[in-house]
Image: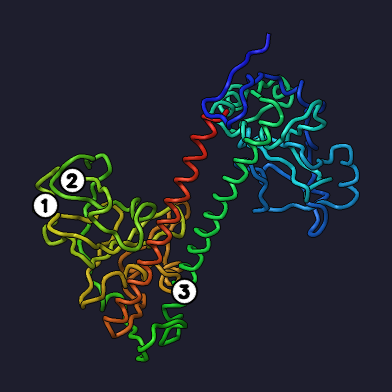
Amino acid sequence: MEKKKKPEIRFEGFTDDWEQRKLKDVYGSIGNAFVGTATPYYVEHGHFYLESNNIKDGKINHNSEIFINDEFYEKQKEKWLHTGDIVMVQSGHVGHAAVIPEELDNTAAHALIMFKNPKEKIEPYFLNYEYQTDKAKKKIENITTGNTIKHILASDMQEFEVDVPKCKEQKVIASYFCKFDHLITLHQRKYKKLKNVKKSMLEKMFPSKGCKVPEIRFSGFTDDWEQRKLKDILVNLQNNTLSRADLLNEAGVAKNVHYGDVLIKFGEVLDINKETLPMISDESVLMKYKASFLQNGDVIVADTAEDSTVGKCSEIDGLLDEVVLSGLHTIPYRPIEKFASGYLGYYLNSSVYHNQLIPLMQGIKVTSISKSAMQDTDIVYPKSVEEQGKIGDYFRSLDHLITLYQRELEKLKNIKKTLLEKMF
């Protein structure tokens, strides 16, 4: 006897119970796309070849594209995908699925599970959203094999059970989530656009090598910028070497800035009052590093990373009367002369400056840069502290906008996740 139930949240006008069905009773064909070596048939321009890399989070992306020649494409004719078919990743990030849109009708695919020839009226986008629920993900996980590389079988998916209402209700639910996804996509585009604007402006608002003024500049400023060696502008402070295990999450005698947080968590400007920092508990550390208590305007450089992000830094801001120390694998610097808040943080993280560090980096798996190597790098800055301030304020405002869109995007994704659990 079929199990029946209803979701927690439902559109008005629908009251019938949902039915639990096996996918083999819904689709006439559930099987694998071509499995084997296809690389001999790859061409620079040809037929788009759909692979698992193109299927993520319920959508088809074109982040990477493979093309196949006419001969191989025609050989796959019996397995061509058509509008409305569903494909699912069977190796790697298993369970991720997508619906074939109109523009990909007659597409050949590689190593995907294909759901074709429905036996009854079914809304494919409804099933695609059901696969995104935690319940469906757990069920797929239960039939997944393999340790290093996860794998699911088409035969197991034939027995996979889904909860389905009448087709009319499926279409309403699918339409709702499609509109929700569109809203998320709009925010993602805006967020990405702002990130690209920032990246571009970090290149154009600081002079490139050999230039005395930047490509883009605030009106009213015409003087050439200064160029000095880092050793003539910044003095090195002492960092502590306490490991994560030596630090506390609760109250202590001083806050500690760890290199990992500089690399991943913090931005160009670190507002001490807006970030949670690990604490140092040992009071003897305070005496040892008393001359290195950080101040607003100091810059902390991460001197170790697993890639070329080594050299990323954060400028200290918002510090009141707290004791803050620079931690393991960091180089803390203090400007000898007065700089406007934010200028050094954004300049030292720009590609204009960071490109100087790339040839100085050492190591293969773990990359590092030394204080001595950084000493002779060039720092370029406007003489006017007012101009420095305008640059810092501009990037701060841009970061604020980026953060707002990032939060809104996360909020929308969380709402979608909640609704997926309550509407299925």
Residue 355 in the image: x percent, y percent? 45, 70
Which residue is pictured at 34% across the width and 76% down the height?
376
Whether the residues at callouts 2 and 1 have beta carbons within 8 Å, the answer is yes
Q: Which mark is residue 203?
A: 3
Label 1: state its secondary structure: helix
Vertical position of residue 100 compared to residue 136: above or below = below
Question: Farthest residue in the bottom direction?
Answer: 223
Which residue is pictured at 45% across the width and 81% down the height?
216
Which residue is pictured at 59% across the width and 18% down the height?
5
Q: Which residue is mark 1?
A: 286
Does any portion of residue 209 appear in the rendered image?
A: no
Q: Which residue is mark 2?
A: 280
Question: Farthest residue in the top direction?
Answer: 1
Q: Earlier in the sequence, mark 2 or mark 3?
A: 3
* 419 sits to left or right of 388: right
How are the colours assigned in the image?
A: rainbow
